[in-house]
Image (cartoon, rainbow, N blue to C red):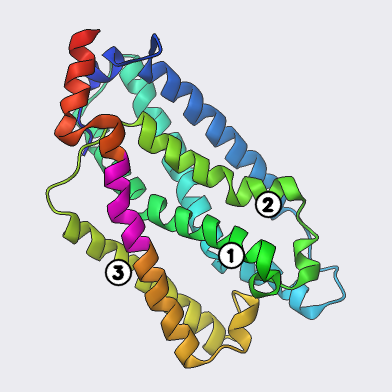
Amino acid sequence: MSVPTPAKLKDIKVCGFSLLHIRLCWYSVSFLHLLVTAVVTLTIDVTVDEDPMVRAYNHVRWKLITFVFKVTLLFYLPLYLYCDVREYLGQVSPRVEKLRSLLDEVMTIFLVPVIKYSDVTFWILYYTYPNIIAPPQLLKYLSYWAQHSLHSVSMVTVVMDLMLTPRRRPGNLEKRAAILVFVGTLYSLFRVYACKVNGEYVYAFLETSSLTTDISMYFAFLLIVLVTYYSQWHFIHFFWGNYGTRIEKSIKVK
């Protein structure tokens, strides 16, 4: 999916700066921020709270969709940083190229649609019906900046990735969309199993939701992530052109 060869990526200039240098700085800062956020949020002890629903969150938080994509980012960012460092040192091998292509798939198939869905949904509910997300007392354990670190910075991270990583539209979007549906369905089934079988309600409202509500939410989730998946390619086209046309022009102008 990556358009330029390793040598070309160095040659692309943004406001006179090498795109490769900008990416090295951005991925380093993003990864450092993610590590700090993980340490701060995961060390919060909610087991001391008097409310049993708040205490239960100590086990439930590992099943949240936010945790899933944060862990994925924890692998994605350093691995892509590794690819860029190898390119900076002029040591790009076929293995590095394969890793870069795999990371591109992870970003466009999973991270972009899921993070946009999760972050936007969180803030809409946070300012309208926060009880749907979690017990009100639980939200007090996280400061406002921590909420933004969890649910705003991740959105900025994926948008910046789309802007800073040259890509072209793949030939078979439907196949990749099917993978997204499969992954989304797996998570939904896992959530149902945790709630209905183990009695661990990942989100507070699931304790009283009906089967009709659960099914409606599942299809709404799939619809939103699929629309996001397809629309991201228009965003990529805006920056990089169709099949690398604008990239080739930018290299020639250099």
Q: What secondary structure is found at the residue carrying circle 3? A: helix
Q: Which kind of residue does numbered mark 2 sit on? A: Gln
Q: Where 207 sits versus 3, above or below?
A: below
Q: Is residue 229 magenta?
A: yes
Q: Which residue is found at the position 56% from the left and 29% from the top?
A: 29
The crowd level at tag 1 (other Cα within 10 Å; few <14, some 14-19, many 20+) is few
Q: Which kind of residue does numbered mark 3 sit on? A: Phe
The crowd level at tag 2 (other Cα within 10 Å; few <14, some 14-19, many 20+) is some
Query: What residue range appears in magenta?
Result: 225-235
User: Which residue is disc 2 drawn over?
Assistant: 147
Q: Which mark is residue 159?
A: none
User: Which residue is disc 3 drawn over?
Assistant: 182
Chain-order first, disc 3 or disc 1: 1
Visible residue check, residue 191: yes
Quadrant including the N terminus: top left
Q: CA distance from mark 2 to mark 3?
A: 29 Å
Q: Verify CB contact (< 8 Å) between mark 2 and mark 3.
A: no
Q: Which kind of residue does numbered mark 1 sit on? A: Trp
Q: What secondary structure is found at the residue carrying circle 2? A: helix
Q: Verify CB contact (< 8 Å) between mark 1 and mark 2.
A: no
Q: Which residue is found at the position 25% from the left and 7% from the top?
A: 254
Q: Where 232 sits versus 200, above or below?
A: above
Q: CA distance from mark 1 to mark 2?
A: 17 Å
Q: Is residue 109 magenta?
A: no
| Residue 48 drawn at (x, y percent) | 85, 68
